[in-house]
Every structure is written in structure tokens, then in C-alpha cells.
Image (cartoon, rainbow, N blue to C red):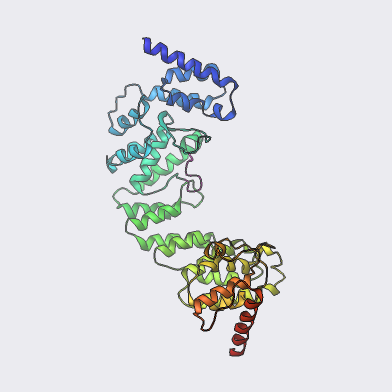
Amino acid sequence: MKSNLILILLMLSYIASYSQESYLDTLNYVPRLIRAGCSWNQIADSIQRWQPSKKIELEKIESAIAFEKPHQSSQLVHLRIENCLKAGTKDNLTGLVEDLTKLGPGYTAALIALVRENAATRLIQSSEDPLAPLAYYCVSDIAIKTLEKVSGIYFFSNTVFPKALLSNSSELERFQLYEQIKAWYGAVQGKSKTEAIDYYLRNTPFNQSGSLIQTAVNLAKFGDTLHARNHLRRYFQEHSTSCKPNVYIANIIKALGEDIALETCLHSLYDFRCMPESAYDCVWYILKNAKSDIPYLVLADVVATERYSRFRQDPEKTVSLLIFREMAGIRQIWAVPVLLELMKMENLVGENGVTASEWARLYPQYPLQTWRICDYALLQYWILTNSEGTAPDWDQKDARDTLRKQILLVQKMEK
């Protein structure tokens, strides 16, 4: 009795401090009361008295009170999740999901039924940022995370906003997701895990809240690389244009053993009418995946001809500068044609959109304030070709220019 009185007094003191605090503190009102160990009834009373506008929060707390009441059902999934509602439970969603996963696929139906259950739990989202808003997981969040772990399908998980919670969705959205998962589950009875994933990918539109791309990666992880690549190729084609290939998906397909974007990237760089928003990704993809000198010859051709394009007048949107920045870490002899073309560009680094942080990191002895694109290209050309003869005095601009002109003259005569 005495301990309860102390807890109530602490809670009231804690609540009273909120009246004048910031928006963030108001946002964290319920999570902090949960973390402080207040009972669900105490939290519900506190919301009604001090934060009556938090109607959704109150519904989650009242659902938690109802969820803790004795049930006729003794399903193990239900009992395990009930433990999260009790004070003293550790803040460990991953551990709970792993624990529930060990129950096996026989409990999948019970998990699906809990997708609509929005009762609050005592699991708090962890964050390294002390200024980040706190959030607590509801039963629906635990259910969907466990379902995704068991099935290999990302029904809800959002790769862009990984901390998005299903419990923050509307009742209609949760119901629609529940119906979708229930229909999938009914259709895949008797199928293997990979067949069930493949069925989901074939019958789910791309605009769902989950991640079809990462689900396809899981399909490959569980042994069906062929169908995984087929699905990813379809997503690549649906979300690419002739000017802007989806390099994110292409890189995933490349990791599964197939290069799908190199040709597209080469063509998009050649078309100067294309806006260069995707140029960085394409240049990076080409340099990472080139298996011969041909992609480097294309990059050299872009550097040689782009300056004559009326579509590429803005230095901030010049692919040649992107190529220059990406060339810093290249130690491939195929890069020589690109370097020869860059040796013709006398733009001073640090001006008019020319940046070279990676060059500066690799060659800290040469100050950016006095070096040009052509100087860095000359230096790397010299390193790659193991040029014979005496190296120039790299600190002297005249010496660098003399050597550069000699190399370019020889290259011109050999054509």
C-alpha cells in the first residue's frame, strides 16, 4: 500500500512537470509514464486528467487493460505477448520476436489475428538520440514484426522509415493489411517457404506499405535466386526510365549474379538531353562493375564531348565533374583514356562546382587551392602508367603543364 502511494505521488509530481514543458515532452508523455512503471489504469487516468486530447493514446492504453484480462484462449503467442504488458519487461523487441519465432509456423494464424490488436505494451523504441521522440510498441507491432521474421515477407516494414510503427496507422489501414495477410495465408497452405514468398511477390502491387524489393532479397536468401531475380528485374523495369535507371535495384540484382544496368547507364550518360540527376549513381555503377575497357572509353567520350552540349551548361549538373570526383579512387589501367581527357580540363578545384574531397584525402600533400582537374588527372596517369623518366616537380605549375602537354601531344600523334 505504501509503495503504491509513493508511486502515485511520484507520478503526480512527474505529470505536473509536463504542464509547462516543450512539445517533445508532451509527445513523450505516455512513453515516459510507461517507462516509469505506472500501471495502465494510472496512465489512463493521467491522460484523461492532463492530456485529454490524446484520444488515440487513451484507446491504446484501454486496449492494454482489456488485453491483460483473463482469456479463454491459452494460445502460447497470446500469453508470450501478454508478458510485454507487465511492468519490468525489458525494452527488447528483437529478443521477443526471436522468442516468438521459435514457436514455429503453427502459430502464424494467431499472429495474423493480432495484427489488428492495438493494445499498448511496455516495450519502448530505443534511440541513441536523447532529443528523439520516444515511442512504445503495441501488440500489432510485435505481431507484424514476428510475422515478417517467420515468413520472410516484409508485409509492412518500411526501408525508408524503418522506425515506422503499424500501430500508428489507422484502423482501416490495419484492417486492410490484416485482410491482405489473411488472404495470402489462406492461399499458400501446403506451399514451401520460397513458394509462399514467390506467391506474395507475384500477387502484390508495388505500392503496398511493405518492401517487395527486400522480400525478393529474402527469396534469394532462402534458396530461390532465379525467381528473386525475375521479380527484381520487373521492379527495375517498372521504376526506371531511359534517362534514369534504378541503380539501387540494379545493385541488388548485381549482388545476385546478374548485371542489368551497365548498358542502360552507358546510354543514359551518352544522351546529353537527359537531366543528370542519376548520373552520380550511374558513374559509380559503371566504375564498380566494368569488366573491360569499353565502359571507361564511354566515360572518356563523355568528358571529351559534354562541354559542347547546350543541355549541360550548369557546372553543378556536369557529368564530367562527377566522373572526375569518382576517378580519385580508381587504380585500373583502363582508366587511362578518361584521365587523358580530364587532363584537358583546366578548371580550378574548389571553384564553379568543382569539388575534390576524395582526391584531397588520397593526395593530402597537394593543396586544393592551387591544383586543377588536369593536375590531379596527370598525377594519377603518372602513377598508373609507371611512366619512365624523371617525374616533374609537382609543386611547380609550369613543370606540370610541360609534362601534361607532352603526354597529350604523344597521345594525339598516336591516333
**Residue projecting furthest to the top:** 1
Q: Is residue 299 visible?
A: no
Considering only vertical position in the picture, is 43 above or below 412?
above
- Residues 399 and 61: in front is 399
Q: Main secondary structure of the magenta part?
A: loop
Q: Is residue 339 left or right of residue 134?
A: right
- Residues 280 and 228: in front is 280
Residue 34 position within the rendered picture, expressed as x and y whole percent measured from the top left:
44, 25
Q: Is residue 257 left or right of residue 237?
A: left
Q: Quadrant of the C terminus?
A: bottom right
Q: Is residue 212 left or right of residue 246?
A: left
Q: Quadrant of the N terminus?
A: top left
Residue 87 position within the rendered picture, expressed as x and y whole percent measured from the top left:
36, 24
Residue 197 position within the rendered picture, expressed as x and y whole percent measured from the top left:
37, 52
Considering only vertical position in the picture, is 65 above or below 145?
above
Number of marks present in the image shown: 0
Residue 390 position within the rendered picture, expressed as x and y whole percent measured from the top left:
54, 81
Picture quadrant of residue 370: bottom right
Picture quadrant of residue 157: top left
Q: Is residue 226 visible?
A: yes
Residue 340 magenta: no
For the record, the magenta segment spans 158-164
Residue found 51% across the figure and 25% down from its top: 29
Q: Is residue 409 left or right of residue 332?
A: right
- Residues 79 and 330: in front is 330
